[in-house]
Image: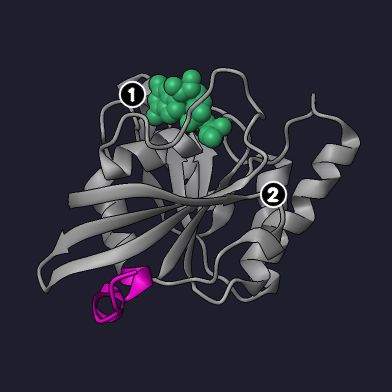
Amino acid sequence: MDVLDAEFIAGATALGQLPAPTFAEVAFAGRSNVGKSSLINDLVRRKRLVRTSSAPGCTRAINIFRVRVRTDAGEAHLDLVDLPGYGYAQRSKAERKSWGPLIEGFLRERPGLRGTVVIIDIRRGLQDDDAQLLEFLDSIGVTPILVATKIDKLPPSKRKPAMAKLRKQVGRSVTPYSAVTGYGREALWSRLLEASSIERANDSPEP
Ligand SMILES: Nc1nc2c(ncn2[C@@H]2O[C@H](COP(=O)(O)OP(=O)(O)O)[C@@H](O)[C@H]2O)c(=O)[nH]1
Ligand SMILES: [Mg+2]
């Protein structure tokens, strides 16, 4: 995938602060420190577009990044939405409680949303809060795009069995990914473009 441009558009800690959607949007959800920001940076091939952190749990905002990609049909815009990480136990309870409505509200109400990527750490497998998010998505009729990241951290012999186990747990296909090696990048882009019906976004006016 050829990403021509990628820029930060907006950050918000409340839904009401977000700008109205302009292009198709794909949201990225996952536990804190799962590698969400790294994955978005790898997708757009920009090292520091999205701030990554070794101190987990520090992204409490919804951040929107606009990308312009070259497609067979020409060029297209797509907005990538980095949602706050969930499930970080060391944050205060009140703070954690505030993330649920923000994430769920966005996933439930955002009119421009075309796809929801749920990212799982392949070494940890499906955690309770991942399962809860999948249940929530199911309850609102959203079929997630599932990604298992940090695949490079497993020795090659353990990758296939770990993926098979995860696929069985979630009952659908999962795209393996490594933000370090770029493994899975093209496969995930295909899923993002398909979810976004990118040709339609292509007809949209310039922002
Ligand atoms: N080895 C490896 N490390 C990763 C990968 N993705 C993220 N990380 C590391 O995991 C930590 C958390 O990543 P970050 O993208 O900030 O996670 P976020 O909290 O979900 O946005 C950082 O130290 C990253 O360098 C990956 O695919 N492979
Ligand atoms: Mg992050």
Instruction: Please state if 40 lies on the left or on the right of 107 as rendered.
Output: left
Q: Between 97 and 120, which is closer to the camera in this rendering? A: 97
**x, y percentage for residue 143?**
52, 68
Res 157 label: 1
The reply to whether the C-beta atoms of the residues labelled 1 and 2 are less than 8 Å apart is no
Q: Is residue 150 above or below residue 173?
A: above
Q: Earlier in the sequence, mark 1 or mark 2?
A: 2
What amino acid type is highlighted by mark number 2? Thr
Label 1 vs label 2, nearer the camera: 2
Residue 156 sits in which quadrant? top left
Question: Does the magenta-highlighted stretch encompass residue 205?
Answer: yes
Specify the quarter for ligand 2: top right
What secondary structure is found at the residue carrying circle 2? loop
Q: Residue at x 44, y 47 (%)?
A: 147
Read off the residue under disc 2. 13
Residue 200 sits in which quadrant? bottom left
Q: Is residue 20 above or below residue 99?
A: below
Q: Is residue 176 visible?
A: yes
Q: Between 17 and 119, which is closer to the camera in this rendering? A: 17
Q: Estimate the spatial distance between the alpha carbons at disc 1 and disc 2, rounded to whole Å.
A: 42 Å
**x, y percentage for residue 47?**
31, 29
Instruction: Please state if 101 lies on the left or on the right of 173 as rendered.
Output: right
What amino acid type is highlighted by mark number 1? Ser
Which stretch did the figure color magenta?
A: 194-207
Q: Is residue 185 above or below residue 117?
A: above
Instruction: Please state if 173 lies on the left or on the right of 31 as rendered.
Output: left
Q: Residue at x 51, y 62 (%)?
A: 144
Q: Residue at x 54, y 71 (%)?
A: 20
Residue 155 sits in which quadrant? top left
**x, y percentage for residue 48?**
37, 30
